[in-house]
Image: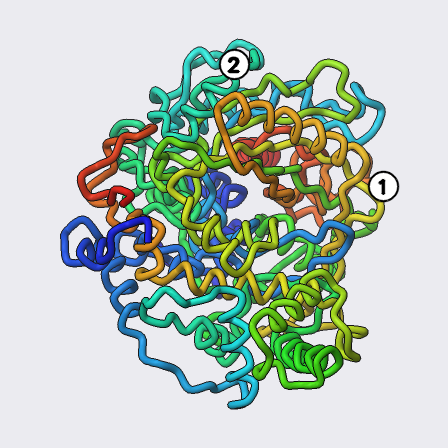
Amino acid sequence: MQHHSINETVDAVIIGTGAGGAPLLARLAAAGLRVVALEAGKQWNPAKDFATDERSQEKLFWNDERLSAGKDPIPFGNNNSGTGVGGSTLHYTAYTPRAQPDDLQIRTDFGVGEDWPFGFEQIEPYYTEVEQFIGVSGPSPYPWGPARQKGYALGPLPLNGAGQLMERGCRDIGLKTSPAANAALSAGYYQEGVGYRHACTNRGFCQAGCNNGAKASMDVTYIPLAVHHGAEIRPECFVTQFVRDGAGKITEVIYIRNGQEERQKCRFVFLCAGAIETPRLLLMNGIANSSGQVGRNVMAHTGLQIWGEFDEDIRPYKGIPGSLISEDMHRPDKADFVGGYLLQSIGVMPVTYVSQMARGRGLWGQDLKRAAAAYNHVAGINILGDCLPYEGNFLELSDEKDIRGLPKPRIYFSNGESEERMTAHADKVMREIWDAAGAKNVWAFPRNAHIIGTCRMGNDRESSVVDANGQSYDIPNLYISDNSTFPSALSVNPALTIMALALRTADKFLKKS
Amino acid sequence: MPYPPNTVRALLNTDQVTDITRQVLTERLNAPSRQPVFFSADEYALLEVVCNRLIPQDDGMQTIEIWGGIDDRLAENKSNGWRYDTMPTDHEAYRRGLTGIEESAQTLFQQPFQQLATDQQDRILGLVQTGDAPGAIWQTMPSERFFEEMLAEAVENYYSHPLVQETIGYVGMADQPAWNRLGLNNLEDREPRQL
């Protein structure tokens, strides 16, 4: 790997190596730019470092404490965050559906929320590119959304027990299903510029780290591609400040490495630290916020889970967790809410499952032990639905300091009427599916997942932090590329869209400069 | 017990677990009993009694020291990444929460929590869980959130233990070289059958 001196003025510093940073880093490096990525977390060696054990894999989560406020406080840590070269993709489930065109025009269609500042045609070619490069496994043709230029790179992964049960229940009540698109390889795959990656071994452990490179986390896809093209990855560097010149442009990025302050001179900065750390860093520095929108518009997908026990032996630790999908509820008939949701079957690891049962059902004592003993017979369905921005949902800096001496972020979140109605709708649909599939002891675990918004992009600098290309309205050499710029939450998991948008932002930047 | 004993321990000696998995699970199996670092001896003793009501360990198995894991985390100043904004820091929450449980015991039964019958202890914990427990502490800290956080941590500590995972038939750690038999009622030889 190439190394740059901190005295050298590199072309760009990229802060964060997750789904927003890594693809962009690779694109800039491939264009011949001298680029350095600063990553707060470690560089892992998954084969050696990743145990198949939930407890020891907690090291992949962003565990600096955040304060969860509002009527529906959002859990962070294992629910919403990641650290390490690869960011949150180290523990995402690899569920990679595309957004549908109407997801980008919620305001046009419903009169609330926000439209994206460009249409689906702007992002579609990047979906195709990402899917082909990282090797998304899925059905071709895909049963929902517009016809595609190209099928998935590989066929879908095999269905596990939860997937079979959801298929059975949906068939019974007349919902269409399909094996889902997952960014885990159903067969060995050669990745241009990187090399060969092995097929998924069905170990079901995506959310706690893949140990054989089958899952397309950034550390086995865009990061090695970026390094191949000359990028430098600097792990364990926590960015705290920016030095700016008289015209307001950023000239240096200040970060802490091994307890020491270092500075990197640069011409451009790409902030890709995710929808919490990106606005937090801007607020701490008091920059890029003439709109007053930094930290506003916190959105989080509705993510209700319905669990049930079955007579069949399921062993929920086997197979890709999100095995089956239905997008029949993308815009359901007679809906009394905005947007829609997808349905997915879910497998689960035991500690996660029992912990949710403690929080969600409040079980303890012998009741808890009896319910936990049914683990091998449980399966779940989950929704992933749109969420509107609300005035009361935002991020601020608290007065409390974290272990680094920096202000902890406080995140206010309350579901609105639309999210509550959507959740009630989904609760009914999923219980029908599970009843039809033969479930007993059905219970619901309400949750919100994926933080979206907080540095909105848009065409109006009064109401947006960045423009449609991700460029700051206030600081011309600052770009943002992550889930913080999404104007609306979409009715699908965000990772694929973050990657696609990152490539688009990189191309817009390269074209301009 | 619905599953046969010794399944995980036997698998740890095979090449069906990776080296790093074997290492972390063996360490957990062999972890020595812990003297409290964060908690006082009195607090630690009370926490043990409370944990034993949350997750009774009356099945003759080796005792899993759930409370030791809590003390270890607090002593190491580790966080799970978030907390309810309505709650004080984890350190303060545990200190005050344990005092609150003691206060509730005195208010309702005029006796220390540890000297109560188990059904009386369960009644107090039930009131803590629903936000109805009496005492001054609970006027300043939401008891239901304290209960939820403590229960979740206790449960995570307990079900992370390989001996406990044996009792629910979990052998997901034995994932080498692959799981080839997926789907309903389709088990590999190394997956234990229910007794």
At which x and y percent is residue A345?
48, 30
Q: State the residue at coordinates (64%, 63%).
A: B83
Residue type at mark 1 is Glu
Which of marks 2 and 1 precedes in the sequence? 2
Q: Which residue is mark 1?
A: A462
Residue A464 higher or lower than B101, as above or below: above
The chain ID associated with circle 1 is: A
Q: Which residue is mark 2?
A: A172
Residue A314 higher or lower than A55, as above or below: above
In the depicted view, which residue is nearer to us: A204 or A12?
A204
Residue type at mark 2 is Asp
In the depicted view, which residue is nearer to us: B96 or B113?
B113
Q: Secondary structure at mark 1?
A: loop
Toward which corner of the image does residue B179 lie, by quadrant?
A: top left
Q: Secondary structure at mark 2?
A: helix
Q: State the residue at coordinates (83%, 40%).
A: A463
